[in-house]
Image (cartoon, grey):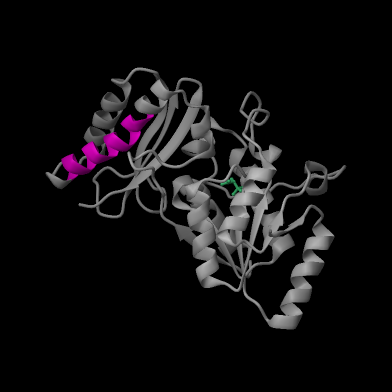
Amino acid sequence: MPLLFKGVKELRNHINSIRKQEKASVGFVPTMGFLHDGHKELIRTSKLQNDLTVVSIFVNPMQFGEGEDYDRYPRDLDRDLAICEEEGVDIVFAPPVEKMYPEGFRTEVVVKGIEDILEGKFRQGHFRGVATVVLKLLNIVNPNRAYFGEKDYQQLKIIERMVTDLNLPVEVVSVPIVREEDGLAYSSRNTYLSEEERESALSIYRSFLLAQKLIKNGNLEAENIKVAIREFILSHPNVKKIDYVEITDENLNRKDIIESGDRILVAVWVGNTRLIDNWKVEV
Ligand code: PAF
């Protein structure tokens, strides 16, 4: 079993004492729990690159807006601990909310310019919550490397920016999206989908394949590709609405003409579930 810590001081003392004895490198995988194969890939990458792997499990209230799914977000610490054991995780940090946000907490981290576009437009304050908790977790764990999935591409870019801007002594390692066999990107929110909704959710991945084919055939106008993606996804039952379909360069700047390495980013409501996904374009 991995060692489980709920308190900040206890975790810090433990990691510091190991570091002193062994000069161990520490890899850190921050999560909100309900671990799936996407998280396993982050853990496996960390284990390959570090002596010690720490996983945090914390459903961060600060990154959920009013009316979002904070209360119903899936939580199962025993299940997560069993997965961490299987994967050979050394330490799990699962603090209660009051340890992360004690009475009087007032600070917010804002990564200007990229926190209010795309996801940020539809989930106001979301990335302030993410950046703040990630900075806190990095300060608590003090890892050599921290692992983030490309599934949350905008989150990854915001964290990279924050780490550079604030001179944080950590290497951010990005890990490609892990998909189920039929193409659905792993997400803890997939558990909300009924069988029929899950079928409709596959339209997201399939729209990327369609877009990729159009692009390979020489259709490089971003506007045309976005229209094709929208029409394809919306033609499926249970798809309630699309928040956005956007094509950007790797730094989230909007593109008119598509080039290799650009990203297609989407947010789609299937039933009452909001799914995000993205795709790296090859021309
Ligand atoms: O990607 C997530 O699961 C969360 O946004 C993170 C990075 C753990 C911060 O709460």
Horizontal arrangement in the rendering, residue 219 relative to residue 178 (left or right): left
Q: Residue 140 versus residue 29: which sits nearer the camera? A: 29
Q: State whether residue 70 is above or below residue 197.
A: below
Determine which quarter of the picture holds residue 17: bottom right
Left or right: residue 42 versus residue 258 is right
Residue sitting at x 24%, y 45%: 257
In-front residue for pair 202/122: 202
Tell me which segment is drawn in magenta: 201-215
Q: Is residue 211 left or right of residue 130?
A: left
Q: Is residue 207 magenta?
A: yes
Residue 205 in view here: yes
x%, y% of residue 146? 58, 62
Tally the marks: 0
Residue 234, magenta (yes or no): no
Furthest toward the right, the residue is 103
Is residue 193 shown left or right of residue 181?
right
Looking at the picture, tell me which residue is in the foreground, 190 or 135: 190
What residue sits 62% from the left and 37% below the top? 125
Q: Residue at x 27, y 42 (%)?
A: 256
Residue 129 quadrant: top right
Image x and y of residue 64, in percent: 64, 34
Say which quadrant the N terminus sits in: bottom right
